[in-house]
Amino acid sequence: MYKKGSGKKSISRNYQNINCESNKNEWDYKNKKIKWGSIEGYTIGKKLGEGTFSQAYKGSCNKTDINVTIRKLIKDRPEKIKREISVLRRIKGSVNNAHIFDAVKGDDDKKYIIMHYYINDGVIKKDTPLSEVELKGYMLQLLNGLDEAHSRGVMHRDIKPSNVVINRKRERLKIIDWGMADFYHPYKEYHLRVGSYYYKAPELLLGVKQYDYSLDMWSFACLFAGFVFGDFPFVKGKDKSEVQLIRSISGLFGEGELWDYIEKYNLKGLSEDKLKAIVSPSKKSKRIMSKAETPFKTELALDLLKKTLKVDHQERLTAKEAMEHPYFDEVRNA
């Protein structure tokens, strides 16, 4: 039976005070005024894709003729737009993250973000022919991108395959789409409606609002596990409901870990449906960790997964710690 615990405040194990008061001009997007350029400096080309809040186009800069990605912002709150632009400017110059060029407006007052144009070879999916060395190299770059963001006080909050682009010719990985990203502050309570379904961390499902950079590490682990076990997405869930996702996670780890987590952080107010979803592993779920052999299922890969795919967010390796794992020894200095 579920017992209410004494509760515990949560703080990140690293980079806690990056966004301190002395650096307020870097993160205080609510009080920032965005200086908008003009879309006339760019030519909009073919449509690349569309999401709930933006449409992406391939374009070019009229002065330099350099290809760019032009994101037309739709249905977004002004505050959210300012946050995304502030985040992108904060991480500008990092090696494995998206690069912002400009923020512009059209004559119709529509807003656009001008980004570097990235070729995406669609590598992160089931049955993509990758060597183990390639996988190690790309996962190391993904962790580096996360550490670059975290060290600047930024949580991505939506790591998933479609937000990671890989150019195999250049062997370069970039993390894109920072629309859900936010600045981390110790003990701040954040809203839970972030992340994409199959990559949502347990803290989002169980109501831990004082989350931190470790949120991204769960998503990284789910993505990495997809390769190791040859199965995307790794964590399943029927009907895309949070209840089913909790059931799937408890099936992987056992009900004890989730009850301990609830107890530790004094998570009151969970719905009856969510509490009932915490179950003992079934025979089917027990087989997940031993199913289909893949070239990537090695002792070191499993050890890295064991240390990042943790229910308790404070027990997960940080991105920097994960980069130092022996799994990456072969490629770390490449």
Image (cartoon, rainbow, N blue to C red):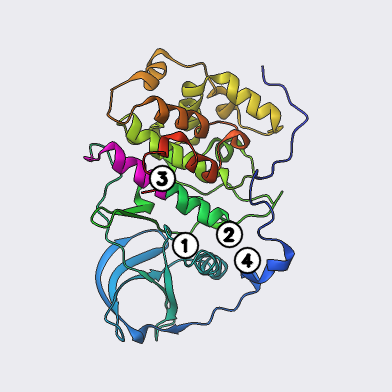
What amino acid type is highlighted by mark number 4?
A: Trp
Q: Which residue is the site of mark 4?
A: 27
Rendering coords of residue 25 (x, y %): 66, 72
**Where residue 17 appears, x then y in whole percent?**
69, 55
- In the picture of the structure, the residue carrying the numbered disc 3 is 332
Disc 2 and disc 3 in contact, CB within 8 angstroms? no
Q: Which residues are magenta?
A: 128-141
Query: Which amino acid, mark 1?
Result: Ser
Q: What separation in Å lies between label 1 and label 2 (alpha carbons)?
A: 10 Å
Q: Which residue is mark 2?
A: 152
- Amino acid at the residue labelled 3: Arg
Rounded to the nearest angstrom, the CA distance separating label 4 from label 1 is 17 Å
Task: Decide if residue 172 is on the left or right side of residue 200.
Answer: left
Q: Position of residue 1 (x, y in %)?
A: 66, 16
Q: Are marks 4 and 2 in contact (CB under 8 Å)?
A: no
The first of marks 2 and 3 along the sequence is 2
Looking at the image, do the residues carrying marks 1 and 2 touch, with CB atoms under 8 Å apart?
Answer: yes
Q: Position of residue 185 (x, y in %)?
A: 67, 54
Residue 218 in sight from this viewpoint: yes
